[in-house]
Image (cartoon, rainbow, N blue to C red):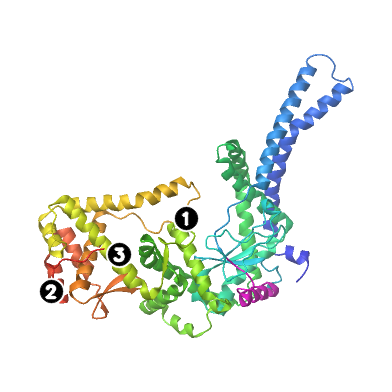
């Protein structure tokens, strides 16, 4: 590893000049706080030497001294908050070197080849992104480095706190480890790891620390007792925002340039895998994980599932031809000692980040394996929705048997809009306690990212009728619940997926035409007059 001078070269002149501009904002703020005190010193000195004798100088001197003392007090409190406030850290799954020695070795080799400091630690995030995160704020000066000694830390942990002056933590998207091959991961991480070089430059590090402290001070200022802190913090942020943004652009450009010589050709191919991973990961979360989360279950092998989802996406998407052939190469998750334990921790954290689930498993928040998913999630989801649909019918008409025929008759003759409205209100009532709980936890409440837009009453009605028909098919026609890696819960008839049910239900809901759905029921062998088993 080269010396500080070589490391400093990683930060371009543009980035360093922007960092100095940020620090000038800090210096001017400090000068503004010290100006009344300086004036007070001048007045007191002049009074003591007899140069300002007589009225009104005693009163003026006393007033200026009082103002200076007040400004110093307020400025000191503000500076203490900026220095000591803890910036928000991304919840991650920390990895110790014992848990991933080969991954640490790969990252250090990258750093050596690019002549930059190695990251101080590695953590995983359940998302398709990778970045460096500085966790050396002054608030942690007394904290010792805390890195999990096991395969993975507690899900939802904010991550490792590192000693002041240490290199930033490398945060890696966990889906990358399972989908990407080792060489692809190396190519993707090269420009990220190269960013540790600018982090070692004192001006850039100082400017980043100042901006992080202001961000944290704004959050502190949103409280009851230090509300006045937020206004000056926001003002200083506005004054240095442009320079800070340009500084980060310069740092990113310098890191990209430094990484040009490392696996450049492979990086183009690897970036294609990044785009594919985004698409498959999103589908897996919204179509597969979300139904389980809503009923208090969390798939414990999401990262393993993303491999199946992306393999299926590769098979269906002609633009991804040939991508599956690379699966014979060594997957990046082989760099972990216990990939199953890491996957489980990342999966639990994903449920917390994207759905707001508890940070730990419990009686009402239990894991589910992929093999058990159709029976424990899909079948239960269908029967829960079927029960809600029939309960809504009971509220709008005379209670009757729990049959598909009852729904068919009501939607040729009844008020579908009223039924859709009732279902919407019932779904909203079920979601209200979770929303209230999140609101009580304040602005930092999870989930951080909403996965699904609000659905119309007609969409909900269609889903609930589909669920009722699927339950009837399972009960009377030998069908079975199944899992499609990209589309989520599916109905299997004779072992094959039936994707033609939803359009026929839509004809019933939108047009009141039950003919296509009755033909489908007859073809599959479903008896619409037979009661459906509910939860």
Q: Which mark is residue 381?
A: 3
> In the image, which is nearer the foreground, mark 3 or mark 2?
3
Q: CA distance from mark 3 to mark 2?
A: 24 Å
From the viewer's perspective, is 45 left or right of 219? right
Which residue appears farthest toward the top when viewing the image?
A: 55
Q: Are marks 2 and 1 in contact (CB under 8 Å)?
A: no
Residue 511 vs 60, above or below: the answer is below
Q: Is residue 224 left or right of residue 259?
A: left
Counting labels gives 3
Q: Name the one closer to the observer, 83 or 265.
A: 83
Sequence order check: which comes first, mark 3 or mark 2? 3
x, y (%) of residue 333? 54, 77
The image position of residue 509, as x and y in percent, is: 18, 59
Q: Residues within 10 Å of mark 3 (few under 14, many from 20)?
A: many
Given the current orientation, which residue lies at the most extreme right position?
Answer: 49
Q: Is residue 333 above or below residue 207?
A: below
Q: Which residue is mark 1?
A: 448
Q: Earlier in the sequence, mark 1 or mark 3?
A: 3
**Which residue shows up at 53% across the image and 74% down it?**
177
- Residue 199's quadrant in the figure? bottom right
Residue placed under numbered mark 2 in the picture: 522
Magenta residues (range): 94-113
Q: Helix, strand, or loop for circle 2?
A: helix
Question: Taking 431 as reference, is 81 left or right?
Answer: right
The quadrant in which the C terminus is found is bottom left
Identify the image quadrant of the N terminus.
bottom right
Circle number at residue 332: none
């Amino acid at each position: 590893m080269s010396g500080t001078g070589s490391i400093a070269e990683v930060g371009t002149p543009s980035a360093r000049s922007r960092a100095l501009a940020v620090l000038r904002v800090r210096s001017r703020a400090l000068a503004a706080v010290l100006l009344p005190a300086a004036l007070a010193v001048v007045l007191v000195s002049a009074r003591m030497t007899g140069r300002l004798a007589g009225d009104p100088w005693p009163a003026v001197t006393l007033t200026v001294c009082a103002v200076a003392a007040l400004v110093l007090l307020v400025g000191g409190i503000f500076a203490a908050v900026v220095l000591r406030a803890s910036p928000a850290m991304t919840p991650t799954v920390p990895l110790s070197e014992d848990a991933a020695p080969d991954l640490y070795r790969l990252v250090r080799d990258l750093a050596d080849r690019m002549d930059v400091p190695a990251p101080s630690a590695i953590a995983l995030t359940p998302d398709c992104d990778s970045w460096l995160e500085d966790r050396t704020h002054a608030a942690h000066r007394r904290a010792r480095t805390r890195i999990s000694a096991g395969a993975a830390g507690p899900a939802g942990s904010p991550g490792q706190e590192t000693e002041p002056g240490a290199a930033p933590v490398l945060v890696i998207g966990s889906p990358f480890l399972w989908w990407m091959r080792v060489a692809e991961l190396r190519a993707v991480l090269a420009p990220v790891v190269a960013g540790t070089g600018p982090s070692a430059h004192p001006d850039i590090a100082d400017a980043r620390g100042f901006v992080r402290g202001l961000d944290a001070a704004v959050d502190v200022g949103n409280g009851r007792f230090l509300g006045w802190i937020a206004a000056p913090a926001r003002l200083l942020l506005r004054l240095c925002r442009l320079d800070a943004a340009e500084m980060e652009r310069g740092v990113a450009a310098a890191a990209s340039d430094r990484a040009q010589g490392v696996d450049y050709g492979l990086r183009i191919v690897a970036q294609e895998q990044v785009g594919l991973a985004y698409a498959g990961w999103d589908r897996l979360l919204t179509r597969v994980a979300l139904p389980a989360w809503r009923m208090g279950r969390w798939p414990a092998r999401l990262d393993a599932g993303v491999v199946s989802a992306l393999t299926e996406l590769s098979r269906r998407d002609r633009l991804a031809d040939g991508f599956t052939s690379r699966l014979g190469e060594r997957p990046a998750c082989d760099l972990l000692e216990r990939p199953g334990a890491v996957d489980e921790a990342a999966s639990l954290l994903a449920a917390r980040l994207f759905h707001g689930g508890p940070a730990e498993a419990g009686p009402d928040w239990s894991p589910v394996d992929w093999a058990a998913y159709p029976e424990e999630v899909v079948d239960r989801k269908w029967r829960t929705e079927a029960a809600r649909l029939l309960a809504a019918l009971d509220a709008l008409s005379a209670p009757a048997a729990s049959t598909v025929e009852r729904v068919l008759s009501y939607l040729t003759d009844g008020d579908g809009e009223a039924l859709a409205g009732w279902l919407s209100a019932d779904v909203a009532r079920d979601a209200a306690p979770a929303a209230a709980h999140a609101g009580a936890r304040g602005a930092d409440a999870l989930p951080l990212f909403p996965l699904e837009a609000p659905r119309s009453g007609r969409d909900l009605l269609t889903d609930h009728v589909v669920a009722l028909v699927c339950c009837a098919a399972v009960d009377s026609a030998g069908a079975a619940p199944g899992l499609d890696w990209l589309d989520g819960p599916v109905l299997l008839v004779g072992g094959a997926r039936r994707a033609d049910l939803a359009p026929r239900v839509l004809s019933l809901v939108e047009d009141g035409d039950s003919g296509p759905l009755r033909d489908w029921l007859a073809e599959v062998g479903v008896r619409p007059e037979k009661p459906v088993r509910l939860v």
